[in-house]
Image (spheres, rainbow, N blue to C red):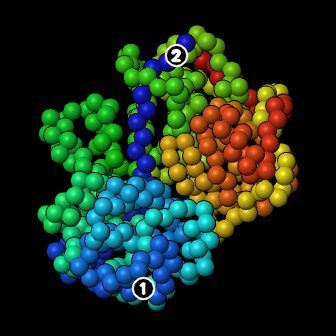
């Protein structure tokens, strides 16, 4: 029986974004851009005078920065007919390190480095450098700063106004676009779940919040419940939907079908993200809904991952573990063991993946999560194969108290 599920997720990333730096502001003359190394997409004319510049500060270790690359590439393609518009991505890292990353991620922008850190200091705090990443700055052809924000906030409308010389804006918060809606909602003190979600997202003083209510019929419908994150709203979900959102697999759960009829609305915020916080949330939900968990073991179907061709395993080229989304369903999992890859597949699919080798080397896996077939094809390209098997694992029975 299909369940109606509404899930709204606002990620408040642990890798926070800065929207202004202490040493710069809009309507001021932009500091000079110092380049020690021109690395990729090097132009014939390196003179930046009388150019509209989209200046992106980034680093190879900055996952939010890398996540923005496809968006910036798309914007650059759409505005390619502007000859005096320059997209430049600047880091302070060694060129060799940057080139290794460029083998995996395609940048359309001019990629440069300032290993002396002069540009980062000038556009950052004036002393040590950029305080947080990512950071995007628009500089007009007159040399004045027109816009400060992040690439995720940069869109076609902003660029069009920038090129018309009608833009002077500093993006101060990720909820900037919601301010007008938010203020109008709370003038009327509306307490709908969606309004409360916006309120919790804006209120940094609230670290933990949980509200569980029996729901009325929902008009929203999606295929499955995504994982609960820092700030989540689930509507018209039954106990099995909730457990799946907490990370359980369907074949690990035993529930009386009669106990899945009742549905709930859940609004949750927790600025702490770890297994302990998730365990506390589970206990609170089970207590409120009147269920107890009985742990056991059983034989369940699994997708067994095996190394088919070790020469195809893509050795990692980065120093930190991260995930870069290349689209709605594609991601690169950086610096992951095969066991960690299996765990990532378990989190993002309904199947249970298993790897029991002692191989602890790190790899960079590019995975298409669209379907079981695309996952299998992605793994084959990495020298891995999948076989249907069975394994003894933990199973859980949830009973009404």
Give the quarter of the image for residue 13. bottom left
Q: Kindly identify which residue carries mark 1.
A: 35
Residue 129 vs residue 106, the one in the foreground:
106
Q: In which quadrant of the rendered image does the C terminus lie?
A: top right
Q: Label 1, secondary structure: give it.
A: loop
* Mark seen at residue 61: none
- Residue 341, given in percent of the width and then of the height, sits at 70, 49
Q: Kindly identify which residue carries mark 2.
A: 2
Q: Residues within 10 Å of mark 2 (few under 14, many from 20)?
A: few
Q: Is residue 169 visible?
A: no
Residue at 40%, 36% (x, y): give it: 8
Is 177 displayed left or right of 59 in the figure? left
Q: Label 2, secondary structure: give it.
A: loop
Rendered position, 124 above or below 116: above
Q: Is residue 155 visible?
A: yes
Residue at 30%, 42% (x, y): give it: 198
- Residue 118, given in percent of the width and then of the height, sits at 39, 88
Rendered position, 64 above or below 39: above
Residue 104 vs residue 399, the one in the foreground:
104
Q: Earlier in the sequence, mark 1 or mark 2?
A: 2
Which residue is outermost to the top?
258
Is 344 displayed left or right of 282 in the figure? right
């Amino acid at each position: 029986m299909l369940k109606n599920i509404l899930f709204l997720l606002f990620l408040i990333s642990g890798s926070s974004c800065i929207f202004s730096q202490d040493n710069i502001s809009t309507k001021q003359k932009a500091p000079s851009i110092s380049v020690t190394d021109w690395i990729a997409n090097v132009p014939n004319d390196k003179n930046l005078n009388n150019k509209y510049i989209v200046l992106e500060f980034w680093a190879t270790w900055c996952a939010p920065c890398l996540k923005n690359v496809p968006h910036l590439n798309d914007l650059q393609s759409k505005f390619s007919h502007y000859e005096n518009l320059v997209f430049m991505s600047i880091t302070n890292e060694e060129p060799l390190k940057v080139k290794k990353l460029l083998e995996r991620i395609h940048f359309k922008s001019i990629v440069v480095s300032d290993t002396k850190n002069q540009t980062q200091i000038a556009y950052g705090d004036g002393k040590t450098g950029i305080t947080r990443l990512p950071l995007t700055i628009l500089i007009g052809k007159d040399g004045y700063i027109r816009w400060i924000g992040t690439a995720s906030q940069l869109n076609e409308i902003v660029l069009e106004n920038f090129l018309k010389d009608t833009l002077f804006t500093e993006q101060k918060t990720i909820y900037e676009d919601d301010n007008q809606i938010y203020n109008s909602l709370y003038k009327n003190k509306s307490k709908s779940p969606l309004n409360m979600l916006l309120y919790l997202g804006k209120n940094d003083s609230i670290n933990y919040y949980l509200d569980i209510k029996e729901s009325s019929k929902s008009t929203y419908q999606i295929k499955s419940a995504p994982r609960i994150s820092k700030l989540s709203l689930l509507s018209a979900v039954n106990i099995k939907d909730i457990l799946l959102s907490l990370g359980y697999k369907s074949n690990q759960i035993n529930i009386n079908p009669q106990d899945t009829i009742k549905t709930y609305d859940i609004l949750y915020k927790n600025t702490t993200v770890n297994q302990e916080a998730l365990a506390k949330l589970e206990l609170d939900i089970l207590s409120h809904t009147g269920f107890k968990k009985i742990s056991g073991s059983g034989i369940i179907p699994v997708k067994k991952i095996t190394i088919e061709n070790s020469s195809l395993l893509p050795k990692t080229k980065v120093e930190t573990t991260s995930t870069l989304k290349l689209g709605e369903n594609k991601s690169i999992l950086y610096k992951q063991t095969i066991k960690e890859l299996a765990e990532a597949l378990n989190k993002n699919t309904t199947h249970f993946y298993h790897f029991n080798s002692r191989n602890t080397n790190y790899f960079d896996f590019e995975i298409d999560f669209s379907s079981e077939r695309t996952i299998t094809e992605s793994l084959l390209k990495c020298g891995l194969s999948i076989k249907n098997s069975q394994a003894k694992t933990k199973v859980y029975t949830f009973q009404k108290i």
